[in-house]
Amino acid sequence: MNGIGWFYLTNFAGAAGCAVLAYLLWSTTPEKLPRREAWTRHKLCGMLLGYAVLLPCVPLARVIAPDLLLPFLWPLALVLPPLCAYYVDYPNARAVGGGLILLAYLTVHWGFDLALPGAAALAVAAWIVGAWGIWLSAQPWKLRDEFRAGVTRRRVIAAFLALFALALAGEALWQLC
């Protein structure tokens, strides 16, 4: 896949992921709360999303990793998701946080690399999403707490994620035309 193909994959997959997360936050009710809380701790989802996040990170990490660690990047990317799913708490919430960090990085990168219209505004939104991803990765129980939060807080976060998803998809569609 060429560079522009990765751009489309990043934007459309990122938009879909943000839209799903926005839907989950928006539609949380007291009846659905136990399933949302369990979702943050789901091991298989965390492992699969961990693979989806870590495998694209290996080529990106090769640039900044010390030469001593380069032979270990691929084996670690293959071994760590199942280990983390088994040994850490909230593996899916951690993977969601990692996915948001990667999405934010790639959004800023592609926006300026392709000189997209609105890249500066999209970069600011991506930094916010990336900071939230760092926060979720460091304190993964906060995603559970977001599901428990009041309706207004959940819906504000969901609306921001939905707008970010629309902006990502819009930039990809703009590039197609």
Image: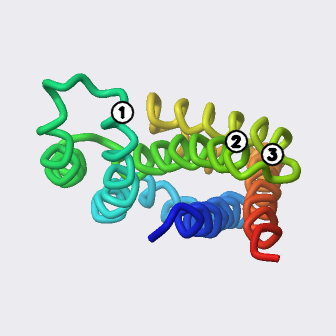
Say the numbered circle drawn on residue 119.
3
Q: Nearer the viewer, residue 133 or 61?
A: 61
Q: Is residue 123 left or right of residue 104?
A: right
Provide the secondary structure element on which disc 3 rests. helix
Query: What's the residue at 68%, 65% (across, down)?
Result: 19
Most distant residue in the bottom direction: 177
Say the numbered circle drawn on residue 132.
none
Provide the secondary structure element on which disc 1 rests. loop
- Inspect the image, locate mark 2, and give the three-letter code of the amino acid beneath it: Ala
- Cα separation, mark 1 vs mark 3, equals 24 Å
Which x, y percent locates residue 136?
51, 37
Query: What's the residue at 44%, 53% (across, down)?
Result: 40
- Inspect the image, locate mark 1, and give the three-letter code of the amino acid beneath it: Val
Which x, y percent locates residue 120?
83, 39
Mark 1 or 3: the one toward you? 1
Q: Check contact, mark 1 vs mark 3: CB within 8 A.
A: no
Q: First in sequence: mark 2 or mark 1?
A: 1
Work out whether residue 30 can be spotted: no
Q: Is residue 150 left or right of residue 131?
A: right
123 to 31, vertically: above or below: above
Work out whether residue 160 can be spotted: yes
Q: Residues within 10 Å of mark 3 (few under 14, many from 20)?
A: many
| Residue placed under numbered mark 2 in the picture | 126
| Residue placed under numbered mark 1 in the picture | 63
